[in-house]
Image (cartoon, helix red, strand yellow):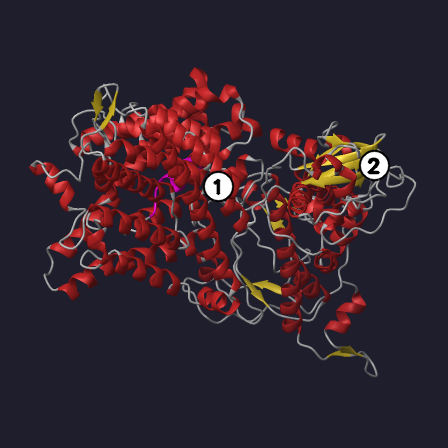
Amino acid sequence: MTDGAERAAMGYEHTLMFGQYREDLGEYARLEASRLKSLEKHRKKEEKRRQKELKPYKNAIHRKLVGLWQNTFARLGEDWFFLAFLGVISSLLSFSMDYAISMCQKSRIWLYRDLTAHPFLQYLAWVALPMCLILFSAGFVHVTAPQAIGSGIPEMKTILRGVVLKEYLSFRTLISKVIGLTCTLGSGMPLGKEGPFVHISSILATILSKLVTSFKGIHENESRANEMLAAACAVGVACSFAAPIGGVLFSIEVTSVYFAVRNYWRGFFAACCGAMVWRLLGVWFKNEETLTAIFRTNFHIDFPFDPQELIVFAGIGAVCGLGGAFFVWFHRQIVHFNRKHKRMNAFLQQNRFIYPALITLIISTMTFPLGLGQFMAAELTTHESMNELFSNVTWSNHHLEVDEAIIVSHWTTNYTNIFVNLVVFIIITFLTTTLAATLPVPSGLFIPVFKMGAAFGRLVGECMASWFPDGITLGGSVNRIIPGGYAVVGAAALSGSVTHTISTSVIVFELTGQMSHILPVILAVLIANGISQALQPSIYDSIIQIKKLPYLPPIVSTSSEAHNVYVADIMVRDVVSVWRGCSYKDLRNILKLKKRLQFFPLVESLESMILLGSIQRIELLRLLELQLGRERRLQEAAKRAQLSESPKTPRTEKKPSRFEVVPVVSSTRPSPKCSPPPSPAATPKSPKKSFLRYSPVNSPYNTITSLDARLKQAFENVFKKALTDPFEKVLVPTLSLTTTYSLSQFESSVPSTPVTKRSQQPRILVDMSPEELLAWEEDQLNALVDFGKCHVDPAPFQLVERTTLIKVHSLFSMLGLNYAYVTAIGRLVGVVALKELRKAIENISSGLFITNTNHFGHGEKSEPPSETQSECEDNMDTGKVSIKRRSQEEHHGSNV
């Protein structure tokens, strides 16, 4: 700050002789200190932001774990131990969750049966616990991590596609998912565990890779990280059903578009470790006899079914295909209905607990055992109902044993038989599942759909047993009907039609422990999948469309218009790039304007646009840090300080000052009053030290104020930010301008440690003043960028303008690309991102795509990009999904 600015700030005005200040010196000092403090705070904030983007924070515990892992397990085989740890930890977590869920469900049954006998009080007990658990789950998930809401498989499908969704694989999301899912399933809502636990296992894989490695070796490669996530998805299914083979196949079908065969062993090994430990925990803590299937069946192996029954099994597959498509459509309509009514949606968002409470009340009322619940075995848990549906007992048989009669009693009433109860069970479960799937809590849909399919198959099997009580005669032999086999076929067919997977047949075999009905199961699953895929997308693809996740939809027909659409029709021509010869100021402005862009093309010049390579955002931030960072600034400040220090001749005479620092006469007893200052003749002629600098000499001083020029300089030295080393702080007593200190008072504020030369000369970090800092930064920003100091990808993925849309779709899906540059003879002409490709496919499917006929004229002047095209650069960022308008982005950039 100049001398004129200082005078203006202090209200200086000329008088007849000397002039005077109208503002108080203390007020001026306070304002100046506040200004300097705000500038320093802003500078530290910028440095902290740059450092945060440059490198992640690693604490001491993390470093110790990294060292332990690298010196032990990493030497023996990193992949094997990592996958084994993943399987064991996932199984422990799954077993703990199952135990907590079982305790909550048993508590609900106890409240209903044993607490009271009054119907109204039983209804309150039946509704109260689910209401509390669902409200707690909804509130906890909303506060901690909203990303934990829902299944998690659609998000994992998007992440394995190559898009990074922020906070979906964080530790906070893990805690929210585990606690929320436990409360949701413990409430007894018709929801499942399989989908959310796939998400949980993926989060565990991500956290383990961060804890046990320092991002070296296998986990530094993005493709290998995706391989570990694919193995984690298999572990999630295996720890839910104890089905390692079906879990691997299901994870491949659900989450991957293209799967590398070399990853099979990772998925199988991790899934086997998880399933084995999960079942062993069940044997140790649940008193199970041995490692058996979860829903063990004992069908006759000699004649499990008659060949004529294959027609009925095919019919079950067809009906399940239609039912699965209708389930997906009905679920999507409920979600669209909630979103369509803006006022209701806004009201429910402001009052977040109303919708979960209302849906929970409706579902609990519909399943109340003294109401509709008596027609659908509402008192049974999911595990118990599945065991009874798969049981090798013909419910319509009139000659039943005691154990068989107990099973049938759960599915009959005094007013209805098993057929009516099974129909009511299917309808009520269908309605309650679609309603419960809209709750803002962690939830899965595989188990309730699996249970509905088993009930439908059981219904068909019981009908066949009633129509053919003696069995089906073929070639002189009579084969009896096994209704439990029909239940297995129906469960596999309906779950396969909803998820569009074939691996549900393998999961069924591992769940039941028998493969006697392998041919009917595969036949029904194939027919159900064919019908369902022709009518509706899978439930996971439907959720992707509802949430508008950045995932590429498939191109259905090879004879579509995708062969006649080229890259030039969909690419963005207005590309943000960096060029050789640009200044650091240009680079900083580009990074501020495009905060979501993670990759920037490097071109020769803005005129030629010859593509030289691609640079990550992190590399450009490192360049700015090297040019404008704290270390560079402190080095420059120290260099300037050395140049400014020159040997000065000591003054022989010094102008007497009205500001004196004189010693106080020592006394044995400290006195609050000070002795009068000695006469000027008695004062030594040695140069006086500043009163703000601590002297190690053990003598007190009396401070007398004055408006001397040295006082002004002292205040400026105080309020300028002189950075000292935090480990070598010097304790300076606060001296008032009008207070006198005695020897004892002064010594009490000084440390009692002996004074050494090192303590007398603390290490001072010389920094620049705000004015010098601004001038220095301006000089540094005007310098040209040296791209040789950063890593440049010399061969980014490139396309030509004549590349067809179907080829681009195949390349993006197979390689997991998020963007690709479009070049013409080495010249950058555009860029294609995931969003443009997805929108083009959707427009082609709906018949709204308009082909641009003037996209091959290289000499033509390109038209201004549309609002959608101008956001292509944002899709190159692998994090965000939301889209901003160009005008808003420019306005934001101008504000920055």
Residue farthest toward the front in the current orientation of the protein: 476
Relative side of 495 to 597, left or right: left
Relative side of 104 to 142, left or right: left
Mark 2 against mark 1, which lies toward the viewer? 1
State whether the magenta stretch is mostly helix, strand or loop. Answer: helix
Q: Is residue 146 visible?
A: no
N-term-proximal mark, 2 vs 1: 1
The crowding category of the residue bearing disc 2, from other C-alpha atoms within 10 Å (few below 14, some 14 to 19, many at least 20), is some
- Residue at 78% x, 68% y is 5
Which secondary structure, mark 1? Answer: loop
Q: Nearer the viewer, residue 212 or 714?
A: 212
Q: Nearer the viewer, residue 275 or 36?
A: 275
Residue 780, x across and y down, in percent: 78, 45
Residue 192 lies in the magenta-colored region: yes
Residue 850, x across and y down, in percent: 76, 47
Q: For mark 1, what is the residue?
A: 538
In the rendered view, would you say 204 is above or below 267? below
Instruction: Name the kind of residue labelled 2 in the image.
Output: Arg
Q: Is residue 252 visible?
A: yes
Q: Quadrant of residue 174?
A: top left
Please identify the quadrant where the N terminus is shown.
bottom right
Please identify the quadrant where the C terminus is shown.
bottom right
Image: magenta residue range: 191-202
Relative side of 197 to 865, left or right: left
